[in-house]
């Protein structure tokens, strides 16, 4: 039968495939970075010192010895699809049990009785399996409020176990090259994946797992691509169109007749620089996720620059950082996943690098700033952004920001309005992101605070002032 | 450094994954089509309607004419003798 033949051929290609980093491991390891920013200030000097002076033994990067299982780890329990629901404190996975104990240590019971006397969480809801209240009585008392989020919590619970279940993840085989004439439809996730030639993802759980990772590059692409769903009639402002038109000049350059032989050598423009500021989990995403950007823009070259004090979170295997040499004065980690993309990671604040003129000059035709959940208005992190924001506005390059939830987005927008009154133009109206992650994340510091990565999206840019006023036109008699 | 082009599904393979073994559309295909279902149905209706209208008009235009409303006069009555003898003209007796 034809279908059997196709199946066995696929099996053989799977067996012959070289071992590669299973993204499930990367996802599972990066879970802790999705909690909200801690209220304490991250000491950049301590972070740098720790990174630079790690013990000088040869770096041992653990290999994958099985799907999602690293060398030196106990082999994971294989969970069947009907066996994905486990209460977190009795989970077969030690990582999840650790998270449950972290919740119980840090989070407080949300029952209104605890206004003046906060109590830590001890009781796990039997319906969703997440520790949420301090006692069964408070859980039963606050049941109507808990019911609002119980289903989403249960779904998140099962997704976490699914990630560690050791199953085969066909959804993590991302689509490959796209011929230019095959246009991409960016109306929603389903049309995007279909027009990109991805394999069909039928189950909702698989969609949730894959969108959790793909949301980062695709959110960025959905704003800057020429086939973007955001146009003048849908959320893009006139100023936004100006900024995007400038960027698209280099993202979709005209064909130059370049080829392989000497006569068709052409001068190539510098790469488009995407500065990802305040990078945390984003910098540890698998490189084929970020390389999706290169497939979406077939003639453009990219330089992705991850900047932030926590940009090496989840990448401890790559320590110690490179030596600081005149060629690399900030000890940046440089990678080339393939020939059209370069990725640099700096463990620094952006304003430090800007003052050292590390990236000057900025050009709105080449540069774009991307801030994934920066928490601009979040009380724990607003102070860190106060120094960077005027610099970003000064570069006149578009600044694209996302937010965890509607409140988070609104708080960021209000903060920017307050701090930079009249100094900025909105490029993209703040609203829900079409390419948000469909998976719910649980905040370890507050389990009732559910969020989806990149839920909201907006963009702004420093205002440009005309230096001269054009002379008034006079009509010749 | 990571997967090369040869290991990605060919376009034919990825297109076929949207249909099951009996060529029925899978769930992801239906989800991908959802923004266009209503507009496509209306466009299809418009095209078929136009074709039907052209057929209807043409068939009516080349159909046989209907002469029910025209009164056909009765055939003239003639007696047997009078019709066999010529009573006037050059050959009359």
Image (cartoon, coloured by chain):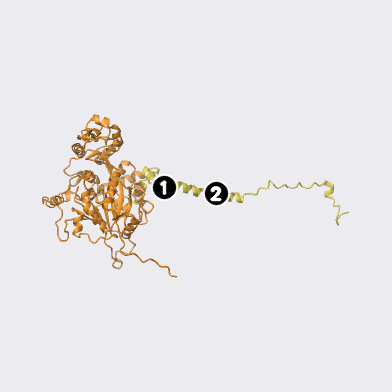
Chain colours: A orange, B yellow
Q: Residue at x 61, y 51 (%)?
A: B62
Image position, residue A472 (x, y; %): 38, 66
Q: Quick check: A69 left or right of A149?
A: left
- Locate residue A203: give its quadrant: top left
Q: Nearer the viewer, residue B87 or A186?
A: A186
What residue would you read off at disc 2? B53
Q: Chain of mark 2?
A: B
Q: Residues within 10 Å of mark 2 (few under 14, many from 20)?
A: few
The number of numbered discs placed on residues in the rendered structure image is 2
Q: Residue placed farthest to the top in the image?
A: A137
- Locate residue A170: give its quadrant: top left
- Locate residue A66: give its quadrant: top left
Q: Residue placed farthest to the right in the image?
A: B93
The image's mark for residue B36 is 1
Image position, residue A140 (x, y; %): 27, 30
The image's mark for residue A108 is none
Quadrant containing the C terminus of chain A in the rendered view: bottom left
- Element carrying mark 1: helix
Q: Are marks 1 and 2 on the same chain?
A: yes
Q: Nearer the viewer, residue A25 or A48?
A: A48
Q: Quick check: A455 left or right of A335?
A: right
Q: Mark 1 to mark 2: distance in Å?
A: 25 Å
In this rendering, does residue B13 appear at all? no
Image position, residue A188 (x, y; %): 35, 47
The residue mark sitting in front, 1 or 2, is: 1
Q: Residues within 10 Å of mark 1 (few under 14, many from 20)?
A: few
Vertical order, A264 against A349 (above or below): below
- Element carrying mark 2: helix
Q: Chain of mark 1?
A: B
């Amino acid at each position: 039968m034809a279908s059997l033949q196709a199946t066995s051929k696929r099996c053989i290609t799977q067996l012959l495939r070289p071992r590669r980093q299973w993204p499930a491991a990367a996802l599972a390891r990066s879970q802790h970075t999705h909690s909200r920013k801690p209220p304490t200030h991250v000491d950049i000097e301590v972070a740098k010192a720790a990174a630079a002076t790690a013990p000088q033994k040869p770096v041992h990067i653990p290999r994958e010895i099985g799907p999602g299982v690293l060398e030196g780890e106990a082999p994971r329990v294989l969970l069947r699809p009907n066996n994905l629901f486990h209460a977190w404190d009795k989970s077969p996975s030690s990582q999840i049990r650790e998270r449950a104990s972290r919740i119980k240590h840090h989070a407080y019971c949300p029952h209104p009785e605890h206004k003046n006397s906060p109590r830590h969480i001890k009781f796990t809801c039997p319906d969703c399996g997440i520790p949420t209240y301090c006692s069964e009585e408070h859980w039963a008392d606050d049941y109507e409020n808990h019911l609002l989020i119980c289903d989403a919590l249960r779904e998140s619970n099962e997704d976490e176990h699914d990630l560690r279940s050791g199953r085969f993840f066909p959804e993590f085989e991302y689509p490959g090259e796209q011929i230019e004439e095959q246009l991409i439809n960016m109306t929603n996730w389903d049309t995007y994946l279909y027009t990109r030639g991805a394999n069909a993802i039928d189950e909702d759980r698989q969609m949730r797992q894959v969108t959790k990772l793909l949301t980062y590059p695709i959110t960025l692409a959905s704003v800057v691509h020429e086939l973007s769903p955001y146009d003048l009639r849908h959320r893009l402002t006139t100023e936004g169109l100006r900024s995007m038109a400038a960027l698209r000049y280099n993202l979709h350059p005209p064909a130059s007749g370049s080829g392989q032989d000497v006569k068709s050598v052409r001068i190539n423009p510098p790469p488009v620089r995407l500065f990802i500021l305040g990078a945390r989990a984003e910098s540890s995403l698998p490189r084929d996720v970020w390389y999706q950007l290169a497939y979406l823009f077939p003639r453009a070259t990219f330089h992705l620059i991850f900047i932030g004090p926590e940009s090496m979170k989840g990448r401890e295997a790559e320590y110690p950082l490179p030596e600081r040499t005149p060629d690399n004065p900030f000890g940046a980690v440089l990678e080339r996943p393939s020939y059209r993309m370069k990725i640099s990671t700096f463990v620094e604040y952006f304003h430090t690098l800007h003052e050292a003129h590390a990236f000057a000059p900025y050009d709105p035709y080449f540069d774009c700033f991307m801030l994934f959940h920066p928490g601009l208005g979040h009380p724990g992190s607003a102070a860190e952004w106060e120094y960077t924001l005027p610099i970003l506005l000064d570069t006149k390059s578009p600044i694209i920001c996302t937010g965890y939830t509607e409140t988070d987005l609104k708080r960021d927008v209000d903060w920017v309005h307050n701090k930079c009154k009249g100094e900025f133009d909105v490029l993209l109206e703040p609203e829900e992101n079409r390419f948000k992650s469909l998976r719910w994340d649980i905040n370890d510091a507050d389990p009732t605070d559910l969020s989806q990565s990149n839920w909201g999206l907006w963009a702004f840019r420093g205002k440009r002032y005309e230096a001269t006023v054009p002379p008034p036109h006079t009509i010749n008699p | 450094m990571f997967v090369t082009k040869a290991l990605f599904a060919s376009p034919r393979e990825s297109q076929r994954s949207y249909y099951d073994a009996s060529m029925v559309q899978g769930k992801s295909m239906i989800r991908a089509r959802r923004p266009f279902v209503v507009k496509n149905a209306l466009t299809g209706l418009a095209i078929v309607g136009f074709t039907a209208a052209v057929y209807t008009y043409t068939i009516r235009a080349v159909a046989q004419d209907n002469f029910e409303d025209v009164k056909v006069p009765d055939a003239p009555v003639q007696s047997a003798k009078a019709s066999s003898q010529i009573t006037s003209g050059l050959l009359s007796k």
